[in-house]
Image (cartoon, helix red, strand yellow):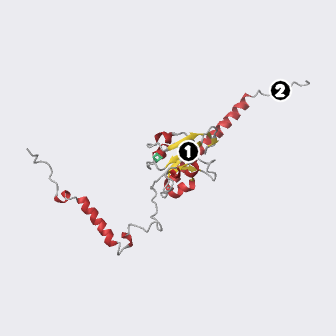
Amino acid sequence: MLDSGAPKPKLLEMFGEGIVKGMAETAKNFFGSYVSEERLTTVQYPEERIPQIENARQFPFLVYDGDDWHGGMRCVACQICEKECPPKCIYIEKSKDKKPDYVGKPQFYPATFDIDVSVCMSCQICVEVCPFEAIKMDTEYELSTTDRFGGLLLDKQKLARPNSHFHKIHPTEATEVDTRLAAEKAKAEAKAKADAEAKAKAAAASKPAPQPVAAGA
Ligand code: SF4
Ligand code: SF4
């Protein structure tokens, strides 16, 4: 027996209300584009380009501070991003020696850091798992090359971008990251200063007090 209590589909829904609405919007833009520039939803690429929105993301890049891409690279080669990348397109080799990070702490750095962008699916998981704000998503999308394999395997120098680039493409996030890193740095410096003062005080307290010299000695 049929369930007579089931809701009956409306006629418009039966004929695809969403499709009708979409077609109406397309028609409005098509005919409207002859009379209004606002209705022009395409540009003459590559001569013209639609400005990228702040949340646009294509492929990852490695952030560095200052002017030296190698010395200022934030990556400490912890390899978390390499482990978490779903299609396994990140290849990292840890350095044997260490270099100071942004708070002056000696850290390893990537001797090798490659990303095969022909495999990368722009999921941003590497960015989300990085504890060091070292990897971010670029908005660059014109990476076409005639070399299908080598041309799309980007090494650490090709992946390196200054923090100013991060500010240019994602200003809100970059400002928030800078503020947080500056606070962490100030905290680390204050702790180092307090530790040094406590050490100096302890050293002074452990020194034997000068003995009084006897008269006539
Ligand atoms: S964006 Fe996703 S696929 Fe691309 S390197 Fe990062 S984790 Fe891997
Ligand atoms: S980019 Fe971040 S998560 Fe990946 S190795 Fe470097 S520090 Fe670790």
Q: Secondary structure at mark 1?
A: strand
Number of other residues with Cα within 10 Å of mark 2, as a class: few under 14, some 14 to 19, many 20 or more? few
Residue 8: x and y in percent read 14, 53
> Label 2 to label 1, Cα distance in Å?
66 Å
116 vs 78, nearest the viewer: 116
Nearer the observer: mark 2 or 1; the answer is: 1
Instruction: State whether label 1 is within 8 Å of ligand 2.
Output: yes
Instruction: Tell me the residue at 46%/57% (across/down).
Output: 54
Residue 211 placement, left or right of 83? right
Instruction: Tell me the residue at 59%/45% (across/down).
Output: 185
Q: Quadrant of residue 109?
A: top right
Say if 201 sits above or below 28 in the image: above
Say if 166 sits above or below 42 in the image: above
Identify the image quadrant of the N terminus.
top left
Identify the image quadrant of the C terminus.
top right
Residue 158: x and y in percent read 56, 52
List the single residue furthest toward the right: 216
Q: Secondary structure at mark 2?
A: loop
Which residue is identified by label 2?
Answer: 212
Residue 200 placement, left or right of 188? right
Q: Do the numbered discs 2 and 1 sit on residues whose CB atoms are within 8 Å?
A: no
Whichever of callouts 2 and 1 sits on the residue coming sooner in the sequence is: 1
